[in-house]
Image (tube, rainbow, N blue to C red):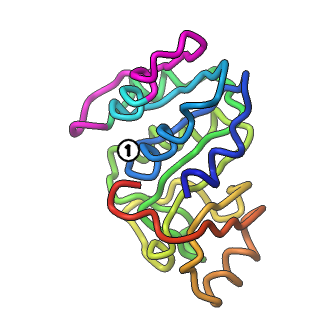
């Protein structure tokens, strides 16, 4: 999933990346992209990108309240995202379903994720097939807001029909992402 999503990141672009396993895998997959600016609320994503040792890489960590070892949220994080203009935003989600759309399980992250989405021109969702028909606590985007949904080829036929009818482009990557992205 991460390798498939990475093809949307071009040298010289500015992207937003949320927290989570799929996002960390994407950060590792972006090691080869030159002249890249990444805005994230994930301490781990920032660490992965920062440890690459590239002088042409700019990593912006939003700041905010640290709710666990990885995620920065709250009004400081939201305010830091206002006024930014990102080419693409990559968001990992807890669930995706026809009614509720794309959801996350942690209420404290929802406002920050929404601000990250609002800062981007295009939204790309990263979610393994097991997330279909799973509904988290808070909706962060309608299915139709996703320009691209990158999932794995384990997605069933019904899910493919439902998601294809709503998202801009459905990309099926080979195999599930596993426990660490």
> Image check: 3 left or right of 66?
right
Mark 1 sits on what residue?
109
Q: Which residue is found at the position 51% from the left and 76% from the top?
A: 132
Residue at point 55%, 9% (across, down): 55
User: Would you say residue 81 sits in the magenta stretch?
Assistant: no
Q: Is residue 153 above or below residue 116?
A: below
Looking at the image, which is closer to me, 2 or 85?
2
Vertical placement of residue 119 versus 19, above or below: above
Quadrant of the rendering where the C terminus is positioned = bottom left
Q: Which residues are magenta?
A: 49-70
Quarter where residue 157 is shown: bottom right
Q: Quadrant of residue 57?
A: top right
From the viewer's perspective, tell me whether residue 177 is left or right of residue 161.
left
Q: What residue do we see at 59% from left, 76% from top?
A: 153
User: Can you give x and y, in whole percent of width and height, for residue 107 in the image?
Assistant: 34, 51
Q: Position of residue 146 (x, y in %)?
A: 68, 56
Which quadrant holds the N terminus?
Answer: bottom right
């Amino acid at each position: 999933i991460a390798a498939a999503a990475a093809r949307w990141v071009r040298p010289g672009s500015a992207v937003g990346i949320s927290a989570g396993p799929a996002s960390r895998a994407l950060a590792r997959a972006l090691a080869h992209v030159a002249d890249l600016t990444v805005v994230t609320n994930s301490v781990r994503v920032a660490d992965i990108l920062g440890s690459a040792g590239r002088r042409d890489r700019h990593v912006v960590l939003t700041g905010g309240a640290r709710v666990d070892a990885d995620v920065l949220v709250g009004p400081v994080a939201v305010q830091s995202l206002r006024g930014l203009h990102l080419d693409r935003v990559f968001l990992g989600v807890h669930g995706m379903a026809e009614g509720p759309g794309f959801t996350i399980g942690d209420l404290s992250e929802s406002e920050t994720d929404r601000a990250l989405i609002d800062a981007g021109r295009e939204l790309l969702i990263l979610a393994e097939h097991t997330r279909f028909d799973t509904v988290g606590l808070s909706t962060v985007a309608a299915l139709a807001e996703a320009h691209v949904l990158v999932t794995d080829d384990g997605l069933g036929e019904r899910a493919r029909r439902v998601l294809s009818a709503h998202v801009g482009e459905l990309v099926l990557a080979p195999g599930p992402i596993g426990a660490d992205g």
